[in-house]
Amino acid sequence: MAKTPFSLKLDSELMEEVKKQAEKEMRSTNNFIEYVLKKYIEEKKQNPAK
């Protein structure tokens, strides 16, 4: 699957939390954000009413 680059602006406090969580899971920040988004999308597909 090809990846599309894009810019993302986040609140600095949120970004620090994302970095901490990514580090805990031994992921890059980019990979962690992609993982969280995929997980969220899959959850929404399974439970569209929530």
Image (cartoon, grey):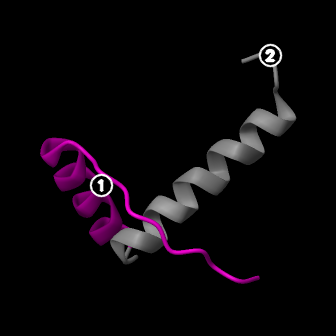
Residue at 38 percent of width and 63 percent of height: 7
Name the residue carrying label 1. 18
Q: Nearer the viewer, residue 9 or 27?
A: 9
* Rendered location of residue 18, percent (x, y): 29, 55
Q: CA distance from mark 1 to mark 2?
A: 27 Å
Circle on res. 49: 2
Whether the magenta-drawn stretch holds residue 8 is answered as: yes
- 50 or 9, which is in the foreground? 9
Residue 22 falls left or right of residue 4: left
The magenta-colored residue range is 1-25
Residue 31 in the image, given as x and y percentages of width and height = 47, 73
At 34% from the left and 66% from the top, the residue drawn is 22
Q: Is residue 49 left or right of residue 26?
A: right
At horizontal 71% and vertical 83% (from top left) the residue drawn is 2
Mark 1: give few (<14), some (14-19) or many (20+) Cα within 10 Å: some
Q: Which mark is residue 7?
A: none
